[in-house]
Image: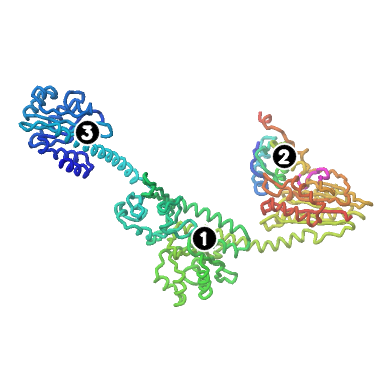
Amino acid sequence: MLGLCGELDLASAPLLESELENAVLGPSSTIVLDLNELGFIDSTGLRTILSAHERARERGGQLLLTGCSEQVKRLLSIAGVSERLRTITSPDGLLV
Amino acid sequence: MDLLVEAGAVLASSLDLATTMGQVARLTVPGLADLCVIDLRDDDGSIRDVAVAARSESIPGDLEELRRRYPLDPAGGHPVARVIRSGEPVLLPEMTSELLSSFAQGSEHAKFMIENDYRSAVVAPLLARERTLGALSVLRLGDGDPYSAQDAELVYELARRSAMAIDNARLFSELRSVERRLEAILANLAEAITVVDEHGRMVFANQAAADLLLIDTPEDLMAQAPGTIMPRFLVYDEHGRQLDLEQMPARRLFRGERAEPLLVRNIIRTTGEERWLIVRSSAITDPQNGEVLFAVNVFENITQVKRVQLAESFMSEASRVLASSMDYGETLQRVARLAVPQIADWCSVDLLNERGEIENVAVHHPDPEMVALAQRLDRDYRRTPDEVAGVPEVLRTGEARIYTDIQPEALAAYAHDNGHLQLLQAIGARAVIIAPMFGPAKPIGAITLVSSESLRRLSNADLALVERLARRAGTAVENARLYTERTVIADTLQRALLPRSLPEIPEAQLQAHYSAAGELNQVGGDFYDVFQYGSDGWMLVIGDVCGKGPRAAAGTALARHTLRAAAMSGKSPTDMLGMLHQALLLQPAEADLCTVCLVSFRRTSENAQLHVALAGHPPPLLIDQHGDARAIGRPGTLLGVLDTIEINESQDTLRPGETLLLYTDGVPEAGRSDRQLGEDGLMRLCRNAPQLQLRELLEHIQEAAVEHAGGRLRDDLALLALRLTP
């Protein structure tokens, strides 16, 4: 599980990208991105998340989002990816 | 009566208790007494003799020895003890051996009194402020006349006056001990403290004050004549205004004004050392009439704190100025103005121009005549890059230089001729710092700071500050130069990527607006396009390719041309988007993400039929004739990332008087993330749409977005609007 905070944009996306790269190649098949502390995502940030989602899916895994703010939900909806990116209300159940 | 007069003089002469009582006792011998003893009661109630005087030389010593060994019992029958207890005087005209034995403190005491032939005695209480401080005893020994009531009255009176003197002396000694304690505290305080009277005389100073005012000891400091200390310093307020003695808080107090703590910049004339002090003064007033007797000055030295604070605020202000504009000639002039008088009296900035010449681009001094002088110096004696010292040297070596304590001979040696020397002398440099401004490879200029009439000594801390400033300024100049070049390129490229002009659509008005993001002079990823679609329709396109710069430019070009090509081959909006998606996926390496909004437009008899297809793009707004806006279209997947996309076309109708507005996310996302303009904000802006021309509406929205972003857009924004001609 990865927790994000601050703003995910052109400047910070490469950081997340390398983290997600590691996570996707790791042993766990499910990656949870906790966006609870995240104030803002722009399109670069969205691409990073979507790319990771695609790679995880190719490997038979999945990428889940939790703690999505209204802005993030809106962005996902406009991007037409709400139905593809599963969002969960709380990550706790997955940590057993 | 003479005795009382003499006693009065003695009692008034000194405030030292033991001395005074000794004198009083001696006054009574031999005129009034053969032996006089003054006893005082201590705080614990015990009685001790403080003065003994006698006609016989041996008696005082013997008596004191005896009293030491056999102290008077405060509760006993000795007349002194009784008088102290009762506060009432006692006259013992005739004392028999039996009487003496009855109150003796033992046989030795009795023997002493009998052997010395104690005959007659008066014991009077020492009464002051209704307290018995002790007793005054006079005795006649041997054959003298016994004391009369008249003698007793005289003794009472003497005792009364002595008591008052003792009381005063005690008060004084208490006061002295409080004072001594206070003085010890003040003397050891780290803060410099002085106490001055209304004539400016210093009545107290501690060592810290002496150190601060450059005098060896507090005593030497207090011995200075009033008004001779301040001229050793240059004193300014924090705004650089020179202050005189009358503006000091202490002088204000004596004038009956309020004296707020004063922050002063203090420069030692002899050395040029600069200190920052907070001067606080409070008044000591006469309790009777409220007049100010003394002013207590406390000087707190905050030089270190102030230096760091000034350096930081100066740097942040300078950085702000340097970042504020890409016109570096003007920003450097503003930086020069900032440095004076905070750091030095002069600031000048030189740049190497494209021909490799040293060019003065900014110079500042508070006096315009002095600035003219410097400009004349630059014009008449322009420095050449091969000169050994000064700016040319720093530009060659890239090393900052500091010259402290410049002597007249050094100026003379540096000057080319007499005229040059005169100009240099008029500028009056006393210390100089020159720091290089670096470009990517080598120095591109230098900042020079000169201390002259302020006598301010430039320190290594100043050198470090000026080096920081020069580095920052160098970067700013370099950026500005690059910016100018790149702005031209980016502008050209962007214009190539956006339609040169919009087509004329019959019976409709069309308007577009594009704003590049703030300071980044790079090509943005937003694009728009309008072209004919089918035989009787038009296609409005707005989109956003993720990112900025060359990559986004390539993505933008790809998007526009793919969509145009797809439209010409008669593809539906969904298929057009599918083609672009495939094209993007075929891009090498990391796929480009792209969002697109397509609105096709076909005129019907009165209205227009709209077909909306969205691919990850914010839905367009349809603004009715009342200014109410609603989003139209259904969400579809963004392009270039996921394997498959899903597009949902929808239809709507545009009526005369209504406005169709397409926009990119740079519009609602303008402003800081926690308070963006938002879609709601955009809809509010649309309320005025019916009253505005399309051009006015788009300008209105763009201005609001820029204002919301505090003048700096972080993303570019594009707007496209359509309205039917009524």
Where disc 2 sits, the SS reads: helix
Left or right relative to B441: residue B260: left
Left or right relative to B669: residue B270: left
In the picture of the structure, the residue carrying the numbered disc 1 is B339
Q: Nearer the viewer, residue B469 or B4?
A: B4
Marks 2/1: CA–CA distance: 48 Å
Q: Position of residue B606 (x, y in %)?
A: 93, 51
- Classify 10 Å Cα crowding around label 2: few (below 14), some (14-19), many (20 and above): few
Colour scheme of this structure image? rainbow
Q: Position of residue A63 (x, y in %)?
A: 71, 37
In the picture of the structure, the residue carrying the numbered disc 3 is B126
Q: Chain of mark 3?
A: B
Q: Disc number at residue A70?
A: 2
Q: Are marks 3 and 1 on the same chain?
A: yes
Residue B699 colored in magenta in the image: no
Where disc 1 sits, the SS reads: helix
